[in-house]
Image: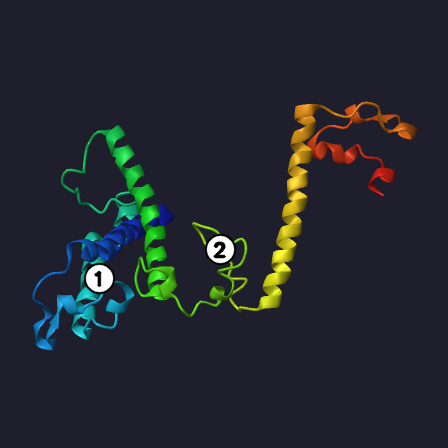
Amino acid sequence: MRRRSVEIKHGRICMLATMGYITPEVTGKFPGFLSPGSGLKFADVPNGLAAIGKVPAAGWFQIFSWMAFCEVGAGYDADVNERKEPGNMGWKPPLLATDNPEIKKRRLASEIANGRLAMMAIIGMFFQDGLTGSAWGDWSNYVDSPLRAFENELGAQAPLGFWDPLGLSKDGDKYSFMRRRSVEIKHGRICMLATMGYITPEVTGKFPGFLSPGSGLKFADVPNGLAAIGKVPAAGWF
């Protein structure tokens, strides 16, 4: 229950954060001043991670004070310790709360699913913002990427381009890249043959006659797939 409570809370925060990233880009920013004393306008605050350095100290104090108020006011972990219902903070949102158990179950499941999606979305936005300067910045803006050394290599295809999720080529080493590409191609060729080796006997049938006349083993006696491993005689493996 404790972990489910944390998951729901983080999902809610990330849904708000995701909308906070998107909304200013779509609707624009508030007019006027965010901090009149500092002469800081809403329009002066960039979207995304760049805003962190623009918010004045008093603004951060207000943000953390509000967070503390929400936690203390709702009762920290009260949803688990008192109400025994993860995510139930004692507030029924208008138009969403219901006493119908089936509708309530469906809506709570939707909240969890959307929260999980939002957690992935906001991390993706942070990552892309950090690399390109915008949550939906073009990859071409990330001029410092060592992967640019390989983005025109054969195999870099749309929509992913040069896909290296583990960062194996982040050092930009040409020899290491060529070595891994060689291994990739060889493994690909082997697997293409293996895939056809699985499929073909099921479609066309097996060869007639004996695989090992000395052992009295026919091709038809060898099962398809992994079960064949125990049927092949030692001389066959050799």
* Label 2 SS: loop
Considering only vertical position in the picture, is 4 above or below 138? above
Question: Going from the N terminus, do you reach mark 2 or mark 1 first?
Answer: 1
Considering only vertical position in the picture, is 66 above or below 196? below
Q: Position of residue 181 (x, y in %)?
A: 61, 57
Q: Nearer the viewer, residue 94 or 159?
A: 159
Amino acid type shown at disc 2: Trp
Q: Position of residue 193 (x, y in %)?
A: 68, 40
Q: Nearer the viewer, residue 149 or 17?
A: 149
Q: Nearer the viewer, residue 181 or 120?
A: 181
Q: Position of residue 174 (x, y in %)?
A: 58, 67
Residue drawn at (8%, 73%), measured in percent from left and top?
Answer: 36
Residue drawn at (84%, 23%), measured in percent from left and top?
Answer: 209
Q: Residue furthest bottom?
A: 38
- Quadrant containing the C terminus is top right
Q: Is residue 56 visible?
A: yes
- Quadrant containing the N terminus is top left
Residue marked by disc 2:
163
Considering only vertical position in the picture, is 111 above or below 207? below
* Label 1 SS: helix
Amino acid type shown at disc 1: Ala
For residue 190, the mark is: none
Q: Residues within 10 Å of mark 1 (few under 14, many from 20)?
A: few
Residue marked by disc 1:
68
Q: CA distance from mark 2 to mark 1?
A: 42 Å
Residue drawn at (19%, 34%), measured in percent from left and top?
Answer: 98
Residue drawn at (66%, 46%), measured in percent from left and top?
Answer: 189
**Seen in the image, is 201 located left or right of residue 53?**
right
Can you tell which of label 2 and label 1 is closer to the viewer?
A: 2
